Image (cartoon, grey):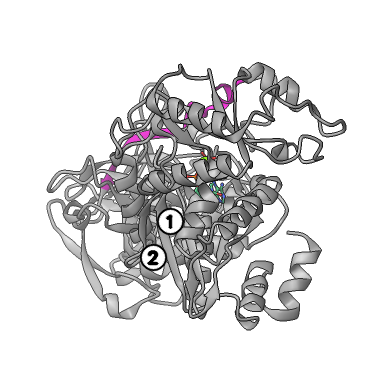
Amino acid sequence: MSNEIKSNESDTGRHFLKQWIAEDVAAGKTGGLVVTRFPPEPNGYIHIGHAKAICIDFGMAREFGGQCNLRMDDTNPSKESDEYADSIKEDIRWLGFDWGEGFYNAADLFDKMYEIAENLITSGHAYVCALSQEEWKTYRGVPTQPGRESPTRNRPPEENLALFRRMKAGAFAEGEMCLRAKIDMASPNIHFRDPVIYRILHVPHYHAGDTWCVYPMYDFAHPIEDAFEGVTHSMCTLEFEVHRPLYDWVIDRMDEMGLLVVRNSVKIRPQQREFARLNITYTVMSKRKLLQLVQDGHVEGWDDPRMPTVCGLRRRGYTPAAIRDFCERVGVSKYNSETDAALLEYCIRDDLNKTALRRMAVLDPVKVVIDNFPDGATDHAEAQNNPEDPAAGTRQIPFSRELWIERDDFMEVPAKKFFRMTPGQEVRLRGACLFLCTHVVKDAGGNVTEIHGTYDPASKGGNAPDGRKVKGTIHWVSAQHAVPLRVRLYDRLFTVPDPLGDDTKDFLAFLNPDSCKAVTAYCEPALADAQPGDTFQFERTGYFCADTRDSTPGAPVFNRTVTLKDSWGGK
Ligand code: ATP
Ligand code: MG
């Protein structure tokens, strides 16, 4: 984050958007109600970048006691669907936000937008143009030199109106004609050089049906939607900054037409400001790219737990509180940057540490045999469900002669500072007892198949009776009672921090082939009762969430939400 923003925040505790809104409220520009909006295009599932925009749009409305509308910005009929619109609503609610009565579809304003377009034609502010897209681009020119006028720029309004009506009636093919705003072909801002505001698309709309074959462009539609909804503060990402003069131009024309909403005798003039997009390392954040991952089968679907989509994160075990906390920590700035994926992981760890119940599960098992423990007997270890939360209580975990432990908790020849299990070194079996390894059994290949040793019957609960020091504590699961469950160890989806950063290679070249490793873990019996969506800390290994799709009663499938420690730097 830049120094400028930091000093802003320390001066006033407010980022620039908060300051901007506060000033307008003070100046009486809002008519007593701050109105913002979140305007997704229903052409894909929303991702964590959208979550940032949602936290800002809804968050600012909340901060100023106002209203945030949810508007489906469905002006491009070719890629939109109800499936996407429904998922967006579900995800926003899940994130903890509510639009109340303020739900809108941009398409409901198609009639009004068309009327405004006709008005612009009549008042000499728009004309029908027959340049092809290629020609239009050449005419528009480069910022350093004025563009060339379209040959039909000065055609009389009546003729433009007649042509526009024929466009609407379906008399022309796609691309044959378009409607352009008549602004300034010499403007250094290329978006001001007579931008296209209506184009022909012979495509039915998922809501409006086949009523229309002319559709408004985003830059024209967006300010109109804001104005009709009485939006006071319209916040979007930085790429729209250069479009802002056009936004203001459309608002000016609506003002001239007397179309601005009046609230408590104040004429509401929507204004736009821009903030930096959220980018996160080791992932991609564009709906188009995410759709490609889904369609080409690189992931299971939009809610694949490796996806940065809100539904993917939910399935992975992320909580709304952790995502909101993350968005808060990322902050609001005017400078594009990449946020370290480790920050998102930090936020979920921080949240789950407080709430997740602890369980024992061994992901890569090797057998331990306690030679002095009676064969066939069962004892129980008592363990806290969550040391961070005494109210979560305790549970009994069965203990017997044969246990599973993690393979990497044992070293026959210990490395320096290896305090876990190794012959001759006592180790604590968490919550159960102290154990001393005496010897191992190996297979023909020299691999350890069984670790043998003895326990100290006087060390119940894992406490040394004489206060002797035992450094290592490891987790275990009774072999006789273990429930084998499927566990998916997710890792980053891409192998490089910026998969889009290499011009010579497609981003798919950087997909991590090991982003989903499935294992059968030996789990303590309580885990078999996990309900879909339940999250646990598997002691010493990480946080895991019972999958909402693949779990069946008595046989949950676990997704690793995040490892217990930040292992990124080291590995
Ligand atoms: P994408 O680039 O992923 O396809 P989009 O901008 O086309 O996204 P929209 O549905 O148009 O998606 O976005 C709705 C709102 O979310 C917009 O106001 C947009 O500025 C904001 N938004 C989209 N991506 C991000 C992001 N990465 N960070 C912050 N805000 C974002
Ligand atoms: Mg968009």
Taking 145 as reference, is 42 above or below it?
Answer: below
Numbered range of the magenta stretch: 506-522
Question: SS for tag 2?
Answer: loop
| Res 470 visible | no
Question: SS for tag 1?
Answer: loop
Q: Image quadrant of residue 285?
A: top right
Membership of 476 in magenta stretch: no
**Residue 355 placement (x, y as % from top left):** 36, 69
Q: Residue at x 77, y 41 (%)?
A: 189
Query: In the image shown, does 514 or 70 lie closer to the viewer?
Result: 70
In front: label 1 or label 2 = 2
Q: Is residue 490 left or right of residue 196?
A: left
Query: In the image shown, does 216 or 481 lie closer to the viewer?
Result: 216
Q: Image quadrant of residue 141?
A: top right
Q: Residue at x 24, y 54 (%)?
A: 524
**Marking on residue 540:** 1
The residue wearing badge 2 is: 97
Label 1 sits on what residue type? Arg
Sequence-wise first label, 1 or 2: 2
Circles 1 and 2: CB atoms closer than 8 Å: no
